Image: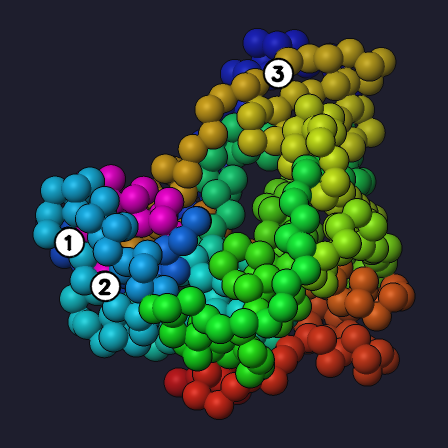
Amino acid sequence: MSTVDRREFLQESVQTAGAVAAGFSFLDATPAQADPSEPLRLAVMGIRGRGKGLALGFAGMKDARVTYLVDVDESLLGPLAKQVAERQKTAAPRTVKDVRTALEDRKVDALVIATPDHWHALGTIWGCQHGKHVYVEKPASHNIWEGRKMVEAARQARRVVQLGTQSRSALHYLEAIAFVHGGKIGKVHMAKAWNSQLRRNIGKKPEGKPPAGVDYNLWLGPAPERPFHPSRFHSSWRWFWDYGCGDIGNDGVHDLDIARWGLQVDFPSRVTCSASKLFFDDDQETPDTQYVTYEYPDARKVLVYEQRLWSPYHQEGYENGVAFYGTEGYVLIGRTGWSVMMRGNKPVAKNSPRFSDDPHRQNFLDCIRSGKRPNADIEEGHRSSLHAHLGNIAARVGRSIPFEGKTETIPGDEEASKLLRRTYRKGFEVPEKLG
């Protein structure tokens, strides 16, 4: 392969990024729903942390209006409703605890979900069944079975469902993926994704009572009945198997999604994981250290995921990143940019743009208008989230597991197969059959 100079690197990556972006939007058509002269009306479910950011982000867009805020903790609703109203220059959005109230309002066009992971699937399915488009945060699902049900619900209702993996709409990621797919680093056989950062110790706490104003029954939703525990509430819920998927399903799914995108693979045939809780002596259940290998023998490719939640430093210049290794060079990519190293250890160029969520939110709104599939369509989101789930399943059973992509099953391993889905609480079941 010939040497790539800086001008060629930047010029060709920008040109091909446009083609990649178009390719991810023009798939199957779904009917546009809303009047193009009117802003799209959104209900935001789960408004602490990421949900607050999404509510304010959509509120700042000219073709969107947040008309409902939904949260089981009433202490969060009033303050954010005031902020949203100020940003939109409208009356305050209606505030409710139960999402079903918002879904019954025919004027609502779309549901934005930023709840704990265990609510993602049911919220998405309910939304589709009520004719709403859905923007759902990552990971798509709490387990593999319900992720497939989310895809089925979106297709049956012919709704736009976008996963909150924002890199799918960021220009510099589109540039880097186009560069890799264009053969600039030769044949790519391997990608490495990593999540290297310092998390906090959440301590050890006794069970207690839900805070005043919290509907704990609604918070539990599909999860098993358990007494309230402060460590399993608000932001630390993600470190418990009943509600979250650990950091591989939190930050890690972003990196797995980018790696799978660049490798152009769908399902692994075998997954091996070494995982431990080494650093934190606290209530957390999920690993702080995790190494997962995904094998794709038909494509002759391998994906490796590394996680260290006790690292006060970045790896390869990025806290969360992906490397694509080709026969002629490699590409490094993270939130703050991407770079190329060619044969002979010669750096070619480095692109360091500003990362923003704005294009991803806009892509969701645009696809509702046009009927096109979004950049992070739920099918792609499910396949990437599935990788996180498989890494966790291999970690929990303590051995390598096979996987059959066509049926999304783990053949010959009864113990691992039980972790493909869960048992749901009465009244909050993900339905076996949709429609």
Residue 38 lies, in percent from the top left, at 12, 51
- Residue occupying image coordinates x 57% and y 24%: 337
Residue 15 lies, in percent from the top left, at 48, 24
Q: Magenta span covers which residues? A: 51-68
Crowding around mark 3 (Cα neighbors within 10 Å: few <14, some 14 to 19, many 20+) is some
Instruction: Give the CA separation, mark 3 to mark 1.
Output: 44 Å
- Residue occupying image coordinates x 64% and y 59%: 239
Residue type at tag 3: Lys
360 in relation to 145, above or below: above
Residue 55 inside the magenta-drawn segment: yes
Question: For the C terminus, which image quadrant?
Answer: bottom left
- Residue occupying image coordinates x 10% and y 52%: 91
Residue type at tag 1: Ala
Between 257 and 115, which is closer to the camera in this rendering? 115
Residue 38 makes an appearance in the image: no
- Residue occupying image coordinates x 47% and y 35%: 170
Between 314 and 129, which is closer to the camera in this rendering? 314
